[in-house]
């Protein structure tokens, strides 16, 4: 990959990124997890830079969440998108601080058991979601009743997506997508 990057240790060789599977152990569970590192072609040193260290940590955290029975980052992203929420809105609704959902979804940190319970409750019950919206006084942000406009140019079809959660949809516009629906609905822009 980065064949032009100079080795910071010897200053002569070039480093390339490698990956190998390494056994990890957590709470008596074992798993083979990918470990990224860089290796110098001159001095042979291997080390993890900031980018590799971050990805290694995320892979480990994602697995630990599974062992602990917590929702994975991808599952939390799917839940948030199911209700058409931004990460900021999710933090406002569930708590955890302004960057909490970015960290949960990237597997940078594990959500607490209490947070996990709340998320699971809302995932299985739309009524729980709307009760929480009401409790937090966020009704204006999540309008329940869509306005149906028969003109073609103003109709936007919304389909709930549960899969493909790796990247946020670049077309996502919370002002257009604030209503909850299991299927397509027209919406006034
Ligand atoms: Zn070197």
Image (spheres, rainbow, N blue to C red):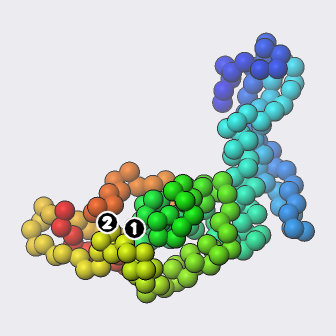
Quadrant hosting residue 147:
bottom left
Task: Locate residue 78, reporting x and y percent.
Answer: 51, 67
Tell me: 152 left or right of 138. left
Q: Residues within 10 Å of mark 1 (few under 14, many from 20)?
A: many
Q: Are marks 1 and 2 in contact (CB under 8 Å)?
A: yes
Q: How many marks?
A: 2
Write the residue at 23% across / 76% down. Answer: 146
Task: Locate residue 92, reporting x and y percent.
Answer: 46, 65
Task: Locate residue 135, reporting x and y percent.
Answer: 43, 80
Q: Residue 5: in sight, yes or no? A: yes
Tell me: 147 left or right of 178. left
Write the residue at 74% across / 47% down. Answer: 56
Depth order, front residue of 146/24 = 146
Tell me: 186 left or right of 70. left
Q: Residue 155: in sight, yes or no? A: no
Depth order, front residue of 92/71 = 92
Q: Residues within 10 Å of mark 2 (few under 14, many from 20)?
A: many
């Amino acid at each position: 990959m980065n064949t032009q990057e100079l080795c910071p240790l010897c200053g002569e060789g070039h480093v390339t990124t490698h990956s190998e599977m390494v056994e990890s152990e957590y709470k008596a569970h074992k798993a083979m997890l990918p470990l990224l590192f860089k290796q110098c072609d001159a001095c042979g040193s291997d080390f993890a830079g900031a980018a590799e260290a971050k990805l290694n940590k995320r892979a480990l955290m994602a697995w630990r969440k599974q062992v602990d029975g917590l929702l994975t980052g991808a599952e939390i992203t799917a839940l948030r998108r199911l209700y058409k929420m931004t990460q900021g809105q999710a933090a406002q609704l569930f708590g955890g601080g302004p960057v909490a959902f970015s960290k949960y979804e990237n597997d940078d940190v594990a959500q607490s058991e209490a947070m996990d319970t709340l998320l699971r409750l809302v995932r299985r019950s739309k009524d729980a979601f709307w009760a929480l919206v009401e409790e937090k006084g966020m009704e204006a942000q999540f309008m329940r009743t869509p306005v149906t406009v028969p003109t073609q140019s103003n109709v936007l079809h919304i389909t709930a997506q549960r899969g493909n959660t790796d990247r946020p949809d670049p077309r996502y516009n919370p002002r257009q997508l604030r209503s909850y629906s299991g299927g397509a609905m027209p919406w006034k822009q």
